[in-house]
Image: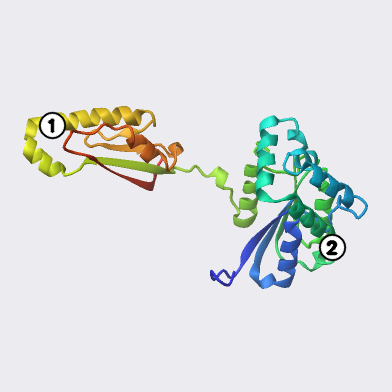
Amino acid sequence: MDAPGSERAALFGISEGGALSMLFAATYPERTRALVFYGTYARHPTLAPESLPHHMELIERYWGTGEYISRFTAQSKASHGNFRRSLARLKRQSASPAAVMAVLRMNAEIDARHILPTIQIPTLIMHRSGGARIPIHEGRYLAERVPGAKFIELPADDHYPFDGSGLVDRIADQIDDFLTGWRSSDVEVDRVLATVLFTDIVDSTKRAAALGDRPWRALLDATMRSSGNSWRAFAAMRSRTSATAFLPPSTGRRAPSAAVRPLPKPSSHSAWRCGADFTPERSN
């Protein structure tokens, strides 16, 4: 925070990140604007000393297959093949089994219960109603012991929030409301990131003078036709007066190079010159 000159910050703690946020807020209240928690705890409810070896065995056997995560944090998606494969790939890329086991050992040692009454920062606590990994009574426990905390019960069972149910948007709305007093989802956004693609014939001034008006006009018309055919695949809006296209935001930043690749050469003695600009524009 010191490096970028941030004097105060709102902290968002998910799962084991909650305890670290609690400790920071209790230690540096003057640097903490607010606390927001989702699915967190003061002491882990399901990583007791007697159950920890079982979790270690499961991780060693199943980590990277999606089995462990879908069993304990995304139960409702356990039978969804695509979700499970994506989750398995994410876990393989994020940590090795040994690293995950080390994290679980540390999580089992977390105990921030004594910190809760000392927190004097505006606090929002969100928890899903049926989560088996971190049961809802853990969220209520926090809300009862953090002075003035606001508690919101969210629907469904999974601890994992990215389940396609719209929960992430709901969490964002609650955070907006808590921190700013309004929700961004209530505001109609009329600006998008537009991609403007411009093409030109190299040395066009010299070419126009050399060819004369009528041949040059024919070359430009052919250029407009060929560019229009190439850009139609990208749902681009084309300028009527120049070889310029306005690509919709959904095409992404790689679209300009893909859009110009099929363009034919204007003539045997000339070449294309292309440029792209990404700029906020009104959506209409």
Q: Is residue 131 above or below residue 99?
A: above
- On the picture, is 131 further left or further right than 235? right
Q: Amino acid at mark 2?
A: Arg
In primary-sequence order, the first of circles 2 and 1 is 2
Q: Is residue 113 above or below residue 229?
A: below
Instruction: Please tell me how crowded label 1 is: few (under 14), some (14-19), or many (20+) other residues with Cα within 10 Å.
Output: few
Q: Please give the residue where the numbered disc 1 appears in the rendered image.
A: 217
The answer to which image quadrant residue 90 occupies is: top right
Q: Amino acid at mark 1?
A: Arg
Q: Position of residue 260 (x, y in %)?
A: 32, 36
158, 107: nearer the viewer: 107
- On the picture, is 198 further left or further right than 56? left
72, 118: nearer the viewer: 72
Q: Position of residue 205 (x, y in %)?
A: 12, 43
Q: Which residue is drawn at the image coordinates 66% and 60% (left, top)?
A: 11
216, 187: nearer the viewer: 216
Q: Which residue is drawn at the image coordinates 21% and 35% (left, top)?
A: 241
Instruction: Please tell me how crowded label 2 is: few (under 14), some (14-19), or many (20+) other residues with Cα within 10 Å.
Output: some
- On the picture, is 130 further left or further right than 274? right
Q: Please give the residue where the numbered disc 2 appears in the rendered image.
A: 113
* Furthest residue toward right: 50
Screen quadrant of the C terminus: top left
Screen quadrant of the N terminus: bottom right
Q: Position of residue 249 (x, y in %)?
A: 43, 39
Q: Which residue is drawn at the image coordinates 11% and 43% (left, top)?
A: 206
Dot 2: element = loop
Q: Is residue 255 above or below residue 140?
A: above
Q: Which residue is drawn at the image coordinates 55% and 71% (left, top)?
A: 3
Q: How is the image coloured?
A: rainbow
Q: Is residue 37 above or below residue 86?
A: below
| Residue 120 seen in the current view | no
